Amino acid sequence: MAKLDGKNALITGASRGIGAGVAKAFAAEGADVVINFPNESEQSNADAVVKDLVDAGCNAAAIEADIANEIQVNAMVEAALAHLGRIDILVNNAGIAPGMLIEDTPTEVLDRILAVNVRGPFLVTRRVLPLMYAQDYGKIINTASQHAYSGWPGLTAYTASKGAVISFTRSLALEVGARNINVNCVAPGGTRTPILADVPEELVEEVRLGIPKQRIAEVEDIVPAYVFLASDENRHFHGQCLSPNGGDVML
């Protein structure tokens, strides 16, 4: 325990699902955490996560911001700095995954997917990275998806956006170079999160049967990858993608 003792983390898209699980795992390891949520409809979920974090002894807060909006991103980072004092760990986790065939995908839906899943991590990282340069320390973790590698019918726009996240991670790692900052990503496999709530159970079962481990992951199966990449045990993983997926996709 205490792998993140004394560290401060900003996690986007953390009012539920993997983001909330990562926030709780970071707190359990000694970090103070600011979570981001996108809009008023997620306020109650964000408040519940913060309560759990505070009950665990974490200095925690929730900040509403649409990460595709530059003004809101800058305000979010300023508020996080005011609460935490510094940002040691950035987890770009916020993402959306509306499912539909490409011929049925309105341009505005494509634009929104790219805005949240690609523009968002770019804007947040661009604001936080100079802070990490100044303190000569940082861990940046981006959330991708195993489907960026495998593809998935009906998720073409989403998988394209997550492929961009992987490429973004690699190029950013090269830009950071020898500085005391590590940039990596996690590409989870099928995981029981609220995103699966709208997926027909027969499709979920089809996915499960195709996984060598024969099960859909729980959030608890995914978060250890984030804890490791955020910790000082990770000194030499840089520009890499860890994919906890039960063997579904072997990188």
Image: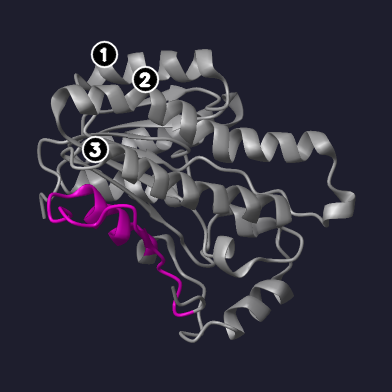
Depth order, front residue of 24/151: 151
Whether residue 17 is visible, yes or no, is: no
**Badges 3 and 2: C-beta atoms under 8 Å apart?**
no
Q: Which residue is drawn at 57% across and 20% down?
A: 69
User: Where, quadrant-wise, is the C terminus in this rendering?
Assistant: bottom left
Residue pointed to by mark 1: 82
The amino acid marked with disc number 1 is Ala
Q: Residues within 10 Å of mark 2 (few under 14, many from 20)?
A: many
Q: How crowded is mark 1: few (under 14 residues within 10 Å), some or many (20 or more)?
A: few
Residue pointed to by mark 2: 77
Q: In this view, does 67 lie above or below 102?
A: above
**Badges 1 and 3: C-beta atoms under 8 Å apart?**
no
The alpha-carbon separation of the residues under discs 2 and 1 comes to 9 Å
Label 3: which secondary element: helix
Q: Is residue 39 above or below residue 147?
A: above
The amino acid marked with disc number 2 is Val
Residue pointed to by mark 3: 55
The residue stretch that appears in magenta: 222-247
The amino acid marked with disc number 3 is Asp
Looking at the image, is mark 1 or mark 3 earlier in the sequence?
Answer: 3
